[in-house]
Amino acid sequence: MTPDPSPRSKWVAIITGAISILVAVLYLGLILVLDSRGPLQPPPPEALGFGSVGASRPAAGLTPRVWGATAAPAAAGVPPHA
């Protein structure tokens, strides 16, 4: 058997354990607050660049992109690849 640890190391272990429990409780509280806000909502179309109130067309050279859409042919009259 090993001798009992010094009183100082006992206090270090107790304080470290208390800090660990405090961090865990704060983390659970943060998660509780974040989860209570409800499900995430998608951003408005204006945030994705699909237009905004008062804007009739995008700036020169900038066109909104749709995910999964294919790009238009570079020159007019060029058929898309099959």
Image (spheres, helix red, strand yellow):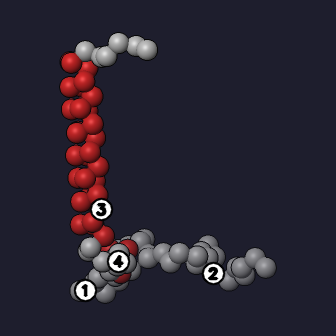
Label ID, residue 31: 3
Q: Which residue is mark 1?
A: 53
Q: Quadrant of residue 80?
A: bottom right
Image quadrant containing the N terminus: top left
Q: Which residue is mark 2?
A: 76
Is 34 on the left-hand or right-hand side of 76?
A: left
Q: Helix, strand, or loop for circle 1?
A: loop
Q: What is the C-alpha distance between the residues marked 4 and 2?
A: 45 Å
Residue sitting nearer the eye, 43 or 28: 28
Q: Position of residue 36 (x, y in %)?
A: 26, 73
Q: Are the residues at dot 4 and dot 2 in contact (C-beta closer than 8 Å)?
A: no
Q: Which mark is first along the chain, 1 or 3? A: 3
Q: Which residue is mark 4?
A: 39
Q: Residue at point 35% right, 75% down?
A: 40
Tell me the crowding category of disc 4: few under 14, some 14 to 19, or many 20 or more residues within 10 angstroms, Cα based: few
Residue sitting nearer the eye, 41 or 51: 41
Q: Position of residue 16 (x, y in %)?
A: 26, 32
Is 66 on the left-hand or right-hand side of 38?
A: right
Q: Position of residue 72 (x, y in %)?
A: 60, 78
